[in-house]
Amino acid sequence: MLYDIAIIGGGPAGYTAAELAGRRGLSVVLFEKNALGGVCLNEGCIPTKTLLYSAKTYQSAKDAAKYGISCNEVAFDFAKMMARKNKVVRKLVAGIRSKMTAANVEVVIGEATCDTTAAMPQISCNGNDYQAKKLMLCIGSETAVPPIAGLDATDYWTSREALQANELPESLTIIGGGVIGIEFAAFFNTLGCRVTVVEMLDEILGGMDKELSALLRTELSKRGIVFHLSTKVTAVKDRQITIEKDGETQLIESSRILLSVGRRPIVKGLKVNEFMQTENPNVYACGDITGYSMLAHTAVREAEIAVGHILGASEKMSYRAIPAVVYTSPEIAGVGKTEETLQKEGIAYIVKQLPMSYSGRFVAENELANGVCKILESTDGKILGVHLLGNPASELVVIAAMAIEKEWSSEDLKSIVFPHPTVGEIIKETL
């Protein structure tokens, strides 16, 4: 059978593209070598957020007295937390499978290989050959493993193993202070694990607003997480980590090591245009494989653009307003330009900033907590970037993303009526 489109990879980009194309009447075959949902659903976004919510609920119970509530003998069950995480993943995977059925997408479980140079893409999987008019590569990324001495002989965790843990480690050293590393640091710390984070950069969460990242680090430090910044891991042996800073070395002992230095595209050097086409116009690529923005929501949007182009639309991919979120408690989120980026690009800007305590709803729901709303404007009033620390930053950043994507000015956004009382009002207050 000749398919209209063949998609390799069943993660956010792949299953989004498959459903969109199938519902628009195209014949679609989707190949996935492991499980529908990809890394995001099975080993990343969803399971980590499920566990973080369990940890947040546990912490809320411990802090209940601040709100006039008595909770005696608050405890957690690690095994039940992990079991619930697995249940959530199974439910969502089943939901994706149902969507594929409803969109008449043929799903093939197996590792597919393909010839991306042919005018009519050829795919092989499980000993069978497939042909399609268009091919979409959505094969994602893999954990980056740095050349640390002794690492290959060490039983270290990546996010996959951490999410499959059957017991809580007494201590955990995390190599890498990016989004994944900090989320795991927050989770294990909340459950009483001694957590150390080693980061080569001079601040955690590289790429996010540096001031707010530092404020989050300060809060996590108060909770007992130890940070080693501007520090390199030089060797690992028998649960011992050798670190180096300014020419001096130090030894850290830890019952577990979590490697979290980022991810890299499975295929290197792949280039795409604004419609997500590769050098072969019949071959598209979306998601982490492009190496541009390794986020599930970016992958979904890229898939929408690619399918739209296959169907004759001319909308181009925009990366102007891709939100980034760290689901710690408090949450930190940002969209658009950071101060560091604007300074590097030589763009003049104005900073408007307020504590989250200017929001009555925030004060009512976040006893003794701090937070910040920072808005960066151009000299002519256009919103360039918005950065938030405090719950629920992950939800509020959507407002900012819409304003930046649509190139609104501060006056445009101020004209919108925000419901009261909401934490979102802080954006309008800051403007």
Image (tube, rainbow, N blue to C red):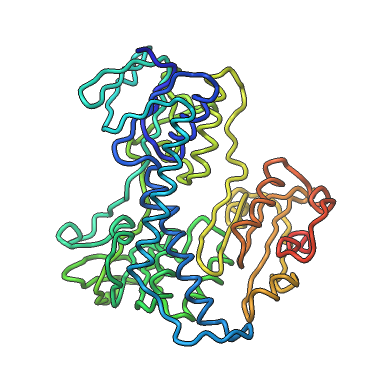
The answer to whether one can see residue 279 in this image is no
- Front residue (pair 32, 342): 32
Q: Dividing the picture into quarters, in which one does residue 315 lie?
A: top right
Left or right of 245, for residue 398: right
Q: What residue is at 37 percent from the left and 49 percent from the top?
A: 42
Q: What residue is at 52 percent from the left and 44 percent from the top?
A: 297
Q: What residue is at 36 percent from the left and 74 percent from the top?
A: 195
- Front residue (pair 168, 353): 168
Q: Dividing the picture into quarters, in which one does residue 393 lie?
A: bottom right
Rendered position, 228 above or below 24: below
Q: What residue is at 27 percent from the left and 77 percent from the top?
A: 250
The answer to whether one can see residue 420 in this image is yes
Measuring from the top left, give residue 353's x and y in whole percent. 71, 65
Measuring from the top left, give residue 140's x and y in whole percent. 38, 39
Point out the image quarter for the N terminus: top left
Left or right of 51, for residue 32: left
Measuring from the top left, give residue 151's x and y in whole percent. 20, 60
- Front residue (pair 429, 340): 429
Measuring from the top left, give residue 82's x and y in whole percent. 35, 63
Task: Count every numbered label the image shows and give the total.
Answer: 0
Left or right of 209, for residue 150: left
Rendered position, 202 above or below 345: below
Point out the image quarter for the C terminus: bottom right
